[in-house]
Amino acid sequence: MNKFGKLYLCPTPIGNLGDMTFRTLETLKAVDLIAAEDTRNTLKLLNHFDIDVPMTSYYEHNKAQKGGVLMERLKNGANIALVSDAGMPAISDPGEDLVRLCIQEGVEVVPLPGPSAFTTALVASGMPTGRFSFEGFLTTNKRNRKNHLNEVKDDTRTLIFYEAPHKLIYTLEDMLEVLGDREIVLARELTKKFEEFYRTTISEAIDHYSSTPPKGEFVLIIKGADPERIEEERKATLPTPEEMLKELSGSMRGKELTNYVAEKLDLPKREVYDIYLKIKNDL
């Protein structure tokens, strides 16, 4: 039996320090090392709660090198807490790589429940919460950003994105172009004094933030695609029954042909069969 340490995923407040859980506090005080996305930010948090535990940095640009270092510590029996700047680590965060590495190496990963910006925004947005898709941050590259949006434009689930204030307008403009003018909720400064939920449309959000410079990190909650619109667009691309009957006449005949066409076009079998009879002489 190995004597590996454990990796604890410790969520930290997304704004209000009162959201720190007792279990997270106890864990941060008990571990041997805290791996932080930004040690300066985390130090303020630790000082506030009188936690005096060694820290090391673990972030996007050093994760390849530092991941191996942390793994060695874990294998030598050290317990390590992973924290992000705010909220749940390993969500849109390099922590996911360390979690994957731990699983590969047989190191136990212990997730602690706690604050998360996207769930906090979602439940207060008024959008459907039964099914949703968390898409994280969009890339800064315009082409790749549009490709990402095109991939989800027909998703009928509620869509959730993170966005920084300096990129917000560009993102909203691309969303308007690709997704259309949908309902959107822009949540910012969550759990803080100036918490705001701006419920509007994408076009109105562009107008608003063009004249009022956005501040703070944003969670964007967007209404999913309209199923009726998707079905109408799908039907618009389908061939007519006449076209499909003529195209497939060489490989099928009679009821086999009409039943196949009716199923593919979602039409009554009798309706397709009547069309078949009218054009039978030409087939």
Image: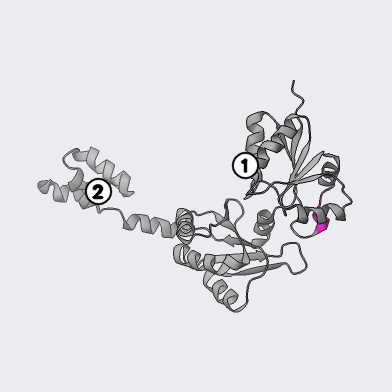
Residue 232: image location, x then y, percent:
38, 58
Q: Give whichever of 77, 196 is nearer the camera.
A: 77
Mark 1 nearby-residue class (10 Å; few <14, some 14–19, many ≥20): some
**34 left or right of 100 in image:** right
* Residue visible at 65% across and 29% down in the picture: 105
Looking at the image, which residue sits at the far bottom? Answer: 211
Classify mark 1: helix, strand or loop: helix
- The residue that label 2 is drawn on is 272
**152 left or right of 82 in image:** left
Report the amino acid beneath label 1: Ala
Q: CA distance from mark 1 to mark 2?
A: 61 Å
Report the amino acid beneath label 2: Val
Residue 124: image location, x then y, percent:
68, 61
Is 19 inside the magenta-drawn segment? yes
**265 left or right of 102 in image:** left
Residue 7: image location, x then y, percent:
74, 37
Q: Give whichever of 119, 244 is nearer the camera.
A: 119
- The residue that label 1 is drawn on is 64
Say which of marks 1 and 2 sits in front: 1
Picture quarter containing residue 251?
top left
Whichever of callouts 1 and 2 sits on the residue coming sooner in the sequence is: 1
Picture quarter containing residue 166?
bottom right
Marks 1 & 2, CB-CB < 8 Å contact: no
* Residue visible at 80% across and 55% down in the picture: 19
- The boundaries of the magenta stretch are 17-21
